[in-house]
Each structure stands twice: as structure tokens, then as C-alpha cells.
Amino acid sequence: MKNAQPPTQDASDVRKGNGTKTGRKNYIKRKRKPCLSIFDVSQLAVEKRIHNQVQLLALANLAEFIANRGYKAVDEAISIGSDIEGAPEMRERKDTHESTELSETERLRSWMQ
């Protein structure tokens, strides 16, 4: 038998990077994602009207949220945001409606007396 190492030893060597059957020079390098350049970020900042690091980080966190969550969570977040945005308007309508009801109640009371 040639190279009488047990099969587990070969597997350990491959995992550790110690001499493989193909050799260390033949490892396939991982392709890196292309990084954004300073120019790319500046164009994005102009397009999104970002003026400071906090706004840029907020955009990055938003992108991370969208990437890591499912469609349902993102849709729910948009729906909740829309509801929150319309809440003051709904409250104003409710207050107007309640004040109208009070006026009618007061008129009925005065009419009954």
C-alpha cells in the first residue's frame, strides 16, 4: 500500500490545509464581491440626499434588514409605517367627529328642556 495513512488523516490534512493531493498551489481562490468605491458611495449619497454618516448607516441597516428578513416581515414593516404616518390624520378626523357628536348631543339636551 502506498501512503498508508488512514482515510481520516487525509481528510484532516485537507481541512487543515496541510498538503493535499492537488497541492497547496492549486487551491481555488474565493472570488470577492466587488467593493463599492468612494465615487459609488458619493453618487449614492447625492441620489438619496444623504448628508452625514448616521443617514448612511441607517440606509445600510435598512438594506441589511431587507436582505435578512422575508417578504412578509418587510411588507409588515411598510404597512405599520404607513399606519403610523396616517395616525395623526386619523386622530384629527376622530376628534372632529367627536366634537360634532357633542354639539348634536348638546342641541338635543337644550331642545328637551
Image: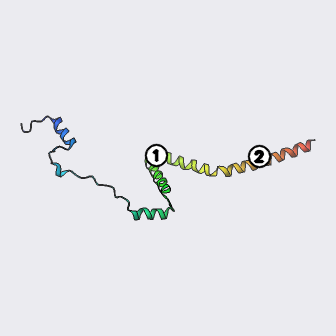
Q: Do labels 1 and 2 touch, CB within 8 Å?
A: no
Location of residue 44 (image quadrant) = bottom left
In the picture of the structure, the residue carrying the numbered disc 1 is: 70
Residue 37, x across and y down, in percent:
38, 62
Seen at 50% across and 48% down, the residue is 74
Seen at 47% across and 62% down, the residue is 45
Left or right of 49 on screen, residue 36: left
Q: Assign a secondary structure to mark 2.
A: helix
Seen at 9% across and 36% down, the residue is 4
Identify the image quadrant of the C terminus: top right
Location of residue 14 (image quadrant) = top left
Seen at 36% across and 58% down, the residue is 35
Residue 110, x across and y down, in percent:
90, 44
Residue 106, x across and y down, in percent:
86, 45
> Does 29 appear above or below 8?
below
Q: In this view, which residue lies farthest toward the left?
A: 1
Identify the image quadrant of the N terminus: top left
Residue situated in front as seen by the camera: 18 or 51: 51
Q: Looking at the image, is mark 1 or mark 2 earlier in the sequence?
A: 1
> Does 11 appear above or below 25?
above
Q: Amino acid at mark 2?
A: Glu
Residue situated in front as seen by the camera: 53 or 104: 53
Other-residue count near label 1 (Cα within 10 Å), few / some / many at <14 / 14–19 / ≥20:
few
Counting every numbered tag in the picture gives: 2
Q: Assign a secondary structure to mark 1.
A: loop
In the picture of the structure, the residue carrying the numbered disc 2 is: 98
Q: In this view, which residue lies farthest toward the right?
A: 113
Left or right of 46 on screen, residue 8: left
